[in-house]
Amino acid sequence: MYEQVTLDYATNALEPYIDQTTIETHHGKHHATYTKNFNDMVEKAGLVGKTVEEILANLPVVPDATIRQGLRNQGGGYYNHNLYFEMFSPNPTKAPTGKLADAINAQFGSLEACIEEISKLAAAQFGSGWAWLSTDKDGKLYVSNSLNQDNPISEGTGHTPLIALDVWEHAYYLKYKNLRPDYIKAFWEVLDWKKVEERYEKLL
Ligand SMILES: [Fe+2]
């Protein structure tokens, strides 16, 4: 059974950056549905017992095209939103320290440049999708964006996302309407770099 992450903050705690109704709908409805559908799909595929990471990293071995696409969509939706909701805090640490800070400075020049690169990809993503900060198989940081619920785990062995920026309209439309760039700016206001850093250090 794949469990949806529970929020460790109140649904109104990210106001005014991410509003209560959006959190309630996004986590309570959209993410809950991805979670239920993913559980159903895994059972249908006969993959019970595999981790979501194993499933997403090995999609090409699923022989049935409909089931493969279902696992990609629902598994991505389940995994991506777990990461998304886990990384917020009403009292976020605004910058990483330690090894993550060093890696970001080495790769992008500065934290501001890193945020700028991810934000540009998020704004440029046509239609529904995500922007990412991830590590590749050599542990090197990189940024990317993806369509629908696709994620870096499916790109190649050993890719691990650290930050997931949801740019589906359901993530921002109730508050920000068509102003996706304003939502992207708000995202960084509640992203807790301490949580990102903890995730990164577990990979080392
Ligand atoms: Fe979403």
Image: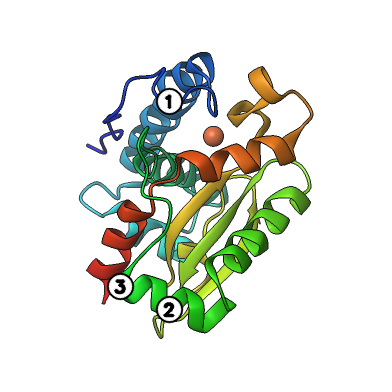
Look at 31% across and 39% down and name the residue there.
43
- Inspect the image, locate mark 3, and give the three-letter code of the amino acid beneath it: Gly
**26 up-or-down from 79: above or below:** above
Circles 1 and 2 in contact, beta carbons < 8 Å: no
Q: Earlier in the sequence, mark 1 or mark 2?
A: 1
Quadrant location, ligand no. 1: top right
Type of the residue with mark 2: Ala
Query: Which is closer to the viewer, label 1 or label 2?
Result: 2
Q: Residue 154's spot in the image, x, y percent?
A: 49, 64
Which of discs 3 and 2 lies nearer the camera? The answer is: 3
Q: Point out residue 126 in the picture as x, y percentages from the top left corner.
A: 78, 47
Secondary structure, mark 2, is: helix
Circle 1/circle 3 CB separation < 8 Å: no
Name the secondary structure under disc 1.
helix
Badge 3: few (under 14), some or many (20 or more) residues near its Cα, within 10 Å? few
Cα–Cα span, label 1 and label 2: 31 Å
What scheme was used to colour the molecule?
Answer: rainbow
The residue that mark 2 highlights is: 103
Q: According to the image, label 3 marks what residue? A: 98
Residue at 42%, 31% in the rendered image: 37
Q: Which numbered marker is on residue 3?
A: none
Label for residue 27? 1
